[in-house]
């Protein structure tokens, strides 16, 4: 292994400072160390602390399980992909404004394999404590997600409690559900 002649430490291909900044920013970083004279890189995967565990409430892909009381900043603009029709924009706005409800509703399109924890993540990945919303473009091209949110919107407007909405979705939408908690009893 080659070493730095001044410090005597191994020479690295990726500078540790860049890695530290990326980890601090919450990125999943793959550091490839390659000793000079070796043709075989050694990958090391570093994930942000607390990511992807059931206790953290955040999936490995950065999707929040629930909004945790965080509200979107007033005047939050929808991303362009969410405004291609008034119907789609209404779905995204409902998911953003009613995250606590939508986060207790499952999705059955198979998106759980992508790290989604509920139907909410098909529209919104997270809302931070300052109210900044990170949207997901997944629902723009998924008819199942759109059908599910339409039913949630309709039932919510009729005054159905979250437990009744969830029961309806469980009974009427077959498929593998996201790992979504049941809403608390009213």
Image (spheres, rainbow, N blue to C red):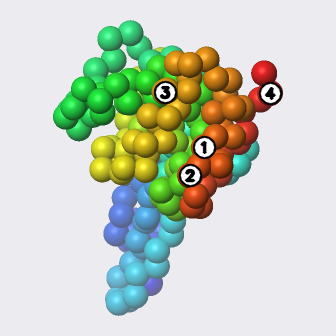
Q: Is residue 70 above or below residue 184?
A: above
Is residue 142 something one can see in this rendering? yes
Q: Which residue is mark 1?
A: 169
Tell me the quarter of the picture where residue 122 sits: top left
Name the residue nearer the viewer: 27 or 15.
27
N-term-proximal mark, 3 vs 1: 3
Q: Secondary structure at mark 2?
A: loop
Q: Residue at x 64, y 23 (%)?
A: 160
- CA gap between label 4 and label 1 equals 16 Å
Q: Residues within 10 Å of mark 1 (few under 14, many from 20)?
A: some
Q: Which residue is mark 4?
A: 185
Can you tell which of label 2 and label 4 is closer to the viewer?
2
- CA gap between label 2 and label 3 equals 16 Å
Check the image and name the residue furthest to the right: 185
Q: Which residue is mark 3?
A: 153
Is residue 128 something one can see in this rendering? no
Q: Position of residue 36 (x, y in %)?
A: 35, 82
Is residue 96 shown left or right of residue 142? Answer: right
Q: Residue at x 33, y 17 (%)?
A: 76
Q: Residue at x 38, y 24 (%)?
A: 93
Is residue 132 shown left or right of residue 79? Answer: right
Q: Position of residue 156 (x, y in %)?
A: 56, 23
Tag of residue 173: 2
């Amino acid at each position: 292994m080659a070493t730095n002649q001044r410090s005597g430490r191994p020479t690295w291909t990726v500078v540790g400072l860049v890695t530290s900044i990326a980890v601090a920013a919450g990125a999943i970083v793959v550091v490839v160390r390659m000793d000079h004279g070796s043709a075989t890189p050694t990958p090391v995967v570093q994930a942000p602390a607390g990511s992807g565990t059931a206790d953290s409430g955040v999936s490995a892909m950065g999707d929040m399980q629930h909004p945790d009381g965080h509200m979107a900043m007033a005047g939050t603009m929808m991303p362009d992909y969410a405004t291609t029709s008034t119907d789609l924009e209404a779905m995204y706005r409902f998911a953003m404004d009613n995250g606590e409800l939508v986060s207790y509703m499952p999705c059955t399109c198979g998106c759980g394999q992508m790290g989604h924890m509920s139907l909410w993540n098909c529209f919104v990945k997270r809302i931070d404590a300052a109210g900044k919303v990170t949207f997901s473009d997944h629902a723009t091209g998924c008819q199942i997600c759109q059908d599910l949110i339409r039913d949630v919107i309709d039932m919510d407007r009729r005054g159905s409690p979250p437990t009744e909405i969830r029961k309806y979705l469980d009974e009427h939408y077959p498929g593998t559900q996201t790992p979504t908690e049941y809403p608390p009893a009213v």
